[in-house]
Image (cartoon, grey):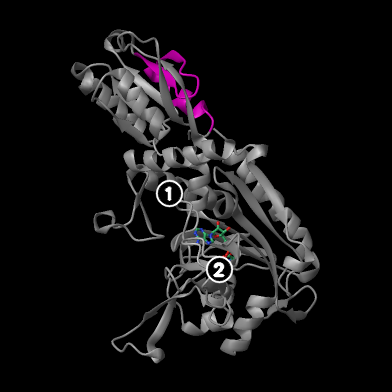
């Protein structure tokens, strides 16, 4: 099989595992699904929340110069007029007159033929706006039209002074937000990679223009460190695409994409963008309110320059699933077999949906094992599993990516010790219950 077929196969297996094990489901599946919308099941939501918590702790809680915000999804429609989204936020698209399919022109290999049916009877390419529209109030007319936000950062610009004043911040400082964004993508595809409803984690860092390139380089380094050290992505899985002069917005001094190697090819995970004074200037113009900052050191007023880091939660989750997916072999007690294939998700412990599973060897041990589980649960995302053979339970925990299993056996009643089984090496070690918390805490990311 060619490499690309193997990698397509990995994607199919991953999508099926995500459904089977409760990570990600197609939204409204019983109605046939809705294209570009996804639901996160019990393990998916645990993974997603762990990703958000890690980003928040890294970008907000761990820094004195970044503040948090949680704004509404629907803003005053003039926000999107000022940001430029209502006038120009879209893709060039063409319709096939023969099969009625609609395509993004930049994604068509042969721009003269419909990728769906091969017909050359295509409409002239035209721009398609990606903003999702709704109506606020009882009257459904243009005066009551509103939009679901297409990026989480615009409310950050709008609330710039409110956050600055209430948090008593001086330049340079940042404002961060995690939340939903909506885009009416023409061709949602590659599982959750391009969705119509997704979440972003964005941080806008405001500084003096003269310092902005230094901050751009700083955030480039910080964000790459986050992927390498905290999410444990390998050098072969990451690359940086620096935007050349022809790719930059007119107000930007620099921009880059951090890309991940997905099974379907390289794809953007995050953008680090120099946004100049564009957004604050536009909101000043459209609202009539000053967006200037008064600098006491130099006794001058100016609009701060912004450096942004912007990443999709769903793309991070998808990258983690792709990074973590592995197949190897494990010992088995099945008749006539010494080994069997196993599927394992090698998540970093910090984001694993379940960090510790407590498994009593027999139902007779349920009571003392459950007591231990309740203790562990206070410090780690944990699960108690009593159903099926121990081999089957290990396989299940491997498939959801649990880094450590704690097995409670009959000896545990006598020696006050349990067996720790490592997901990656499958090695087992005996640990006393008294030392268990410290041993678990000592494992990378388990805190
Ligand atoms: N505020 C800047 C901004 O929104 P963007 O490059 O359009 O920039 C930032 O989006 C990130 O949001 C992307 O790198 C990606 O991770 C995520 N993203 C964008 N569109 C998406 C979509 N349709 N589905 C899932 N994630 C998306």
Say if 90 sits above or below 416 in the image.
below
Say if 308 sits above or below 259 in the image.
below
Q: Residue at x 40, y 28 (%)?
A: 398
Does the magenta portion include 441?
A: yes
Rate crowding at label 2 as few (under 14), some (14 to 19) or many (20 or more) other CA atoms within 10 Å.
Answer: many
Any mark on residue 153, and which? Answer: 2
Direction from residue 300 to residue 116 in the image, left or right: left
Any mark on residue 49, and which? Answer: 1
Q: Position of residue 322 (x, y in %)?
A: 51, 40
Q: Residue at x 31, y 57 (%)?
A: 33
Q: Is mark 2 within 8 Å of ligand 1?
A: yes
Q: Residue at x 69, y 55 (%)?
A: 219
Q: Position of residue 25 (x, y in %)?
A: 34, 49
* SS of the residue under disc 1: helix
Q: Relative to the observer, which residue lies in front, 82 or 246?
A: 246
Say if 430 sits above or below 81 in the image.
above
Residue 323 in sight from this viewpoint: no
Q: Residue at x 56, y 78 (%)?
A: 124
Point out the image quarter for the N terminus: top right
Does the magenta portion include 79?
A: no
Query: In the rendered structure, which segment of residues is drawn in magenta?
Result: 417-444
Q: Relative to the observer, which residue lies in front, 211 or 100?
A: 100
Q: Position of residue 430 (x, y in %)?
A: 42, 12
Rate crowding at label 1 as few (under 14), some (14 to 19) or many (20 or more) other CA atoms within 10 Å.
Answer: some
């Amino acid at each position: 099989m060619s490499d690309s077929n193997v990698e397509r196969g990995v994607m199919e297996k991953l999508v099926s595992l995500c459904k089977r094990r409760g990570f990600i489901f197609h939204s409204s599946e019983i109605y046939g699904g809705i294209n570009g919308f996804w639901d996160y099941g019990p393990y998916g939501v645990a993974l997603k929340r762990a990703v958000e918590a890690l980003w928040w702790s890294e970008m907000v809680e761990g820094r004195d110069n970044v503040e948090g915000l949680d704004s509404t999804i629907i803003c005053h429609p003039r926000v999107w007029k000022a940001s430029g989204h209502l006038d120009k936020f879209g893709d060039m698209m063409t319709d096939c007159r023969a099969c009625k399919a609609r395509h993004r022109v930049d994604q068509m290999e042969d721009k003269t033929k419909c990728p769906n049916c091969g017909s050359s009877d295509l409409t002239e390419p035209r721009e398609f706006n990606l903003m999702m529209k709704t109506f606020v109030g009882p009257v459904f007319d243009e005066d009551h039209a509103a939009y679901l936000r297409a990026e989480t950062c615009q409310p950050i610009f709008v609330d710039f002074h409110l956050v600055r004043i209430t948090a008593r911040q001086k330049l340079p400082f940042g404002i961060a937000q995690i939340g939903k964004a909506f885009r009416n993508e023409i061709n949602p595809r590659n599982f959750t990679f391009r969705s119509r409803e997704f979440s972003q984690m964005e941080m806008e860092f405001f500084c003096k223009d003269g310092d902005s390139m230094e901050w751009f380089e700083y955030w480039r380094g910080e964000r790459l460190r986050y992927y390498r050290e905290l999410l444990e992505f390998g050098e072969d899985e990451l690359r940086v695409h620096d935007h050349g002069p022809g790719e930059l917005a007119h107000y930007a001094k620099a921009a880059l994409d951090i890309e991940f190697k997905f099974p379907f090819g390289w794809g953007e995970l995050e953008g680090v963008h120099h946004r100049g004074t564009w957004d604050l200037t536009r909101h000043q113009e459209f609202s009539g309110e000053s967006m200037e900052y008064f600098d006491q050191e130099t006794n001058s007023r100016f609009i701060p320059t912004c450096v942004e880091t912007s990443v999709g939660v769903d793309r991070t989750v998808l990258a983690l699933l792709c990074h973590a997916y592995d197949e190897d072999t494990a010992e088995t007690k099945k008749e006539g077999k010494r080994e069997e294939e196993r599927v394992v998700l090698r998540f970093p412990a910090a984001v694993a949906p379940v960090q510790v599973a407590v498994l009593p060897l027999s139902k007779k041990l349920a009571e003392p094992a459950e007591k231990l589980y309740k203790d562990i649960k206070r410090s780690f995302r944990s699960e108690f599993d009593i159903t099926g053979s121990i081999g089957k339970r290990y396989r299940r925990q491997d498939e959801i990516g649990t880094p450590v299993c704690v097995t409670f056996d009959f000896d545990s009643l006598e020696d006050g010790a349990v067996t720790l089984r490592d997901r990656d090496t499958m090695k087992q070690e005996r640990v006393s219950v008294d030392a268990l918390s410290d041993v678990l805490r000592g494992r990378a990311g388990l805190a």
